[in-house]
């Protein structure tokens, strides 16, 4: 997977450095370089990701990013730390504080790649006619509507499938990995080694925990980036 990039900065040396970093990163493809946000407006077609400076004349990076409702994603690059909060308010994927080295750049690039991979996976849904699954439980085969699933808890070789308006979970001899691969990624998200959650059923998130009534599902560090990407992509500010 190649992520098509545009680099935007009014400082030539900063553009040169970004070009070097992009060209040495195998999964990035440089589509062009712009010395202003105004120039970038004409080159956004077929671009997936902007490395975007914030403080620029005429139109700054924050103002440009606000116009990208359905356009490329953004990683901000700036020398001013006070812009960080404003950057995340417009759903930037990351924020690089100048001067940054290649290791910091690569970390942000990997975060972007993870977001695009997650987005690509979310397009691989079950067809509408397959809005349910069959599982073996108590020597029976049970049909479960996907929309009824709250969350799934893994217990070694078993899983517990918790359903809305049903007090007891359905237990089945199946692996979490097999379930995760089968469930549509635009609705079901692995948030912990032991938990998959139906994000359509999530109404409250509290301190990196998902709340289902009196049940708190932890979001572990390993799965937190994907969880944050999922939420930020639907976050209204």
Image (cartoon, grey):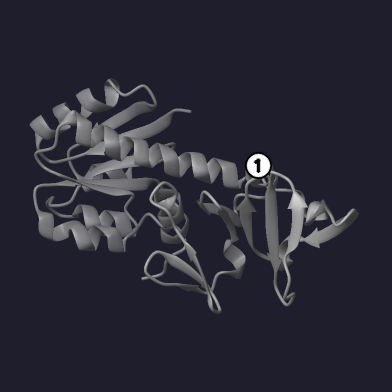
Q: Residue at x 21, y 31 (%)?
A: 103
Relative depth, front residue between 205 and 95? 205
Relative depth, front residue between 171 and 22? 171
Q: Is residue 236 left or right of residue 189?
A: left
Relative depth, front residue between 139 and 198? 139
The quarter of the picture where residue 49 lies is top left
Q: Residue at x 36, y 21 (%)?
A: 26
Q: Position of residue 196 (x, y in %)?
A: 59, 55
The quarter of the picture where residue 228 lies is bottom left
Q: Determine whether 84 is above or below 97 in the image.
A: below
Q: Which residue is mark 1?
A: 181
Classify mark 1: helix, strand or loop: helix
Q: Residue at x 17, y 38 (%)?
A: 35
- Report the number of discs: 1
Q: Position of residue 134 (x, y in %)?
A: 83, 52
Q: Is residue 166 left or right of residue 236?
A: right
Disc 1 crowd rating (10 Å Cα; few below 14, some 14-19, many 20+) is few
Relative depth, front residue between 161 and 112? 161
Q: Position of residue 140 (x, y in %)?
A: 90, 55
Q: Is residue 203 left or right of residue 143?
A: left
The quarter of the picture where residue 214 lies is bottom right
Q: Determine whether 54 is above or below 19 in the image.
A: below
Quadrant location, the C terminus: bottom left
Q: Position of residue 102 (x, y in %)?
A: 19, 29
Q: Residue at x 35, y 58 (%)?
A: 91
């Amino acid at each position: 997977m190649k992520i098509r990039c545009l680099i935007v900065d009014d400082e030539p040396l900063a553009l040169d450095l970004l070009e070097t970093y992009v060209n040495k990163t195998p999964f990035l493809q440089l589509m062009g370089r712009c010395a202003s946000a105004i120039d970038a407006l004409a080159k956004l077609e077929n671009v997936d990701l902007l490395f975007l400076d914030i403080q620029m004349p005429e139109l700054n990076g924050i103002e440009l990013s606000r116009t990208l409702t359905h356009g490329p994603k953004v990683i901000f690059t700036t020398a001013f730390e006070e812009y960080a909060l404003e950057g995340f308010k417009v759903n930037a994927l990351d924020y690089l504080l100048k001067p940054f080295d290649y290791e910091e750049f690569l970390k942000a690039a990997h975060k972007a790649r993870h977001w695009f991979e997650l987005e690509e996976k979310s397009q691989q849904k079950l067809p509408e006619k397959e809005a349910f699954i069959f599982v073996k439980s108590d020597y029976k085969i049970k049909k479960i509507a996907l929309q009824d699933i709250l969350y799934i808890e893994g217990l070694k070789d078993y899983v517990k499938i918790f359903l809305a308006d049903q007090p007891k979970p359905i237990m089945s001899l199946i692996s979490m990995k097999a379930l995760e691969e089968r469930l549509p990624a635009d609705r079901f998200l692995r948030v912990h080694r032991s938990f998959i959650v139906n994000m359509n059923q999530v109404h409250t998130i509290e301190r990196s925990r998902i709340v289902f009534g009196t049940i708190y599902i932890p979001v572990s560090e390993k799965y937190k980036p994907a969880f944050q990407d999922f939420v930020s992509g639907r976050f209204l500010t």
